[in-house]
Image (cartoon, rainbow, N blue to C red):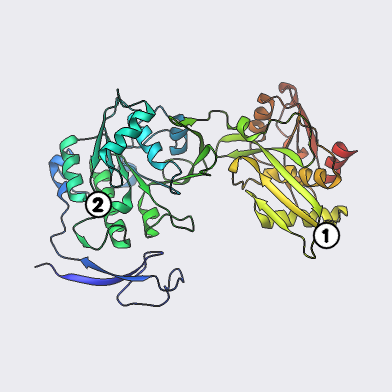
Amino acid sequence: MAKTKSAYFCQSCGYESPKWLGQCPSCKQWNTFVEEVVDKGSSRVPEWRSSTTAGSPKRTNKAAVIHEIVYSEEKRILTPDHEFNRVLGGGIVPGSLVLIGGEPGIGKSTLMLQLALSIPQVKTLYISGEESEQQIKMRAERLNQSSKANCFILTETSTQNIFKQIESVQPDVIVIDSIQTLHSSQIESAPGSVSQVKECTAELLRFAKESDTPVLIVGHITKDGAIAGPKVLEHMVDTVLQFEGDRHHVYRILRAVKNRFGSSSELGIYEMQGNGLREVSNPSEIMLSQREESMSGVAIASMLEGIRPLMIEVQALVSPSAYGTPQRSSTGFDTKRLHMLLAVLEKRFGFRLGTQDVFLNITGGLRVEDPAIDLAVIAALISSQQDIPLPGTSAFAGEVGLSGEIRAVNRVEQRIAEAEKLGFDGIFISKYNLKGIDPKKYNIAIRPVANLEDVFRSLFG
């Protein structure tokens, strides 16, 4: 008879303890330990371990010298969704485990079903533990892609039954929606608990690696924005994707947080429509608002997300403070870095901003970490304070140092080319970026600057 074991798990981070604790030693959260019965018996043999499920006899691994290992380039599964391919690093890698997280109602299930229906040459198994077959069929009809799809639908939450259906269908790609609804009979706890999520993910991981079948997992997130379940869940999978956006707006951002097979700084942009998600091939156009007249406090920055250059709009509002303590607020930009740039303006150039309210906004719902937009932030702040509009045909790409110097940024040629493609007349860059650049091959005026004084003199006279 299998011996059972009872343990306490932190519902915030997954820390395991043999006894109840008031505070978690790992994440320092209070009253998060819940008792769960864990079956540690010898009968824990997943049913998918049979040779028929894996598609080949079970092999025994042995140690090998690294120079004797034969490496062959993985043939990825390319989908019609170019944004999804870019974020994954060139397509779906066979045998990979991909985790997609996002807020409720953001469109995770729509994205996964749309992906499963759009690859007719690949047999896909869509497993849902949240919706019925009729609900999934209704959504597929709305996407207008169900007629030619080679997609199988399964509504099941038991991993044992799921692996039996996988053995029967033999799919090329598997989609799980969602991991918090699955439960394994090997663990005697409720679905969604820390131990259940960890065990179900471990079973799917072993299956993916042994059968060379890619598995896409949808995961819920907590109120803090982290994926629900133990933190080890993100370490177990190969790729973690975050689906972001505002449910009240039409644009969505698919961001790679972790990727073992590509860059972890890529993003894809979608537009939510009535018939599903549409790829946005040129996101710079949607990031720039269409204005008929020039307004103060608006500057255009050239930034990079992964290998993709983007032109974004930086909006600033500087006004006298109505209260004793001035407000400092930023959306999409690091507030501490905003404080640093304000200190540079006040200390080095004499702008009196200590009694001014400062509000900064990055349009399009982006969260920007590229230091190259510092110059655009400075230009927008001074434009708003002086109430002088900036030239709408000029862009900015430069990092600002503590002494007011304009530092060079990486891959400036891509930034210049993107600004030229969108019809800008000029771009301000650091003069230290001019090395190796031929300005004559561009149809845009390249304006090198060494410090903020050169920028002010050129913009405001």
Question: Gap in Å between the C-alphas at discs 2 and 1?
Answer: 59 Å
Q: Does residue 259 appear left or right of residue 375 in this picture?
A: left
Q: Does residue 114 appear left or right of residue 370 in this picture?
A: left
User: Closer to the camera: disc 2 or disc 1?
Assistant: 1
- Residue at image mark 1: 355
Helix, strand, or loop for circle 2? helix
Residue located at (53% from left, 28% from top): 281
Quadrant location of the C terminus in the rendered image: top right
Measured from the top left, where is residue 237 in percent x and y?
A: 36, 49
Q: Amino acid at mark 2?
A: Glu
Q: Does residue 298 appear left or right of residue 255 in this picture?
A: right
Measured from the top left, where is residue 113 in percent x and y?
A: 35, 35
Residue 75 in view here: no
In the foreground, 267 or 318: 318
Residue located at (51% from left, 40% from top): 253
Measured from the top left, where is residue 145 in percent x and y?
A: 35, 26
Vertical placement of residue 330 versus 436, above or below:
below
What is the quadrant of residue 96 in the picture? top left
In the foreground, 338 or 325: 325
Q: Amino acid at mark 1?
A: Thr
Q: Residues within 10 Å of mark 2 (few under 14, many from 20)?
A: some
Residue located at (68% from left, 41% from top): 409
Q: Does residue 56 appear left or right of residue 93 in this picture?
A: left
Vertical placement of residue 386 versus 171, above or below:
below
Residue located at (36% from left, 55% from top): 233
Quadrant location of the N terminus in the rendered image: bottom left
In the foreground, 401 or 237: 237
Q: Residues within 10 Å of mark 1 (few under 14, many from 20)?
A: some
Helix, strand, or loop for circle 1? loop
- Residue at image mark 2: 203
